[in-house]
Image: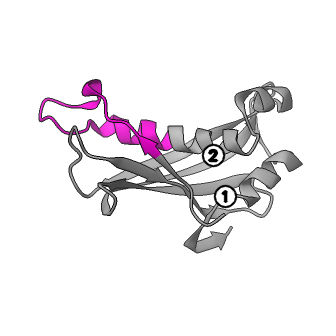
Amino acid sequence: MEDYKRLVQIRWSDLDPNFHLRHSVYYDWGAFCRIEFLNQFGLTAEAMYQLQIGPILFREECVFRKEIILGDEIHISLQLSKARPDFSRWSIQHEIIKNKSTVAARLSVDGAWMHTQQRKLITPPEHVHKVFSEMPQAKDFAWL
């Protein structure tokens, strides 16, 4: 897959007292984008429930570059930046683009898979491998 982007909407409730985007909204958009990708490739909430797995995050970081205000057109992209060959650990990066060309923020997360009944980290089943293999890779992608 060459590129994965999603359009996101700015709501009035997303703004802070300075009338620009609240910091926590960037993180919500990242989660939205990641889940949309998983859903599109068949790793839905129902599928994860059946497999008894769920993604967890160890680190989530956002670098804010340009202000986002109500009325800006916003897209968020998704790329796999690092992964173990079994996809038990991974890093995903997002770029939040305003008005088609301005990088407003860069968000990165480090995560893994957890068995939801045993409550421990696991190597995910083959279905996860297939989905993560479809994820666009960053230019500087590295196997862990």
State if disc 2 and disc 1 touch (CB < 8 Å): yes
**Among the two numbered marks 1 and 2 on one chain, the one whose residue lies closer to the N terminus:** 2
Which residue lies most toward the left here?
Answer: 18
**Residue at position x 65%, y 56% in the image:** 90
Location of mark 1 (residue) = 135
**Residue at position x 68%, y 38% in the image:** 39
Image location of residue 129, percent across then percent down: 81, 54
Q: Secondary structure at mark 1?
A: loop
**CA separation in Å, label 1 and label 2:** 8 Å
97 versus 30 height, above or below: below
Camera-nearest residue between 72 and 27:
72
Q: Secondary structure at mark 2?
A: helix
**Neighbours of disc 2 within 10 Å: few (<14), some (14-19), many (20+):** many
- Residue 37's label in the rendered image is 2
Residue 83 magenta-highlighted: no
Which residue lies most toward the right here?
Answer: 126
Q: Amino acid at mark 1?
A: Met
The boundaries of the magenta stretch are 7-31
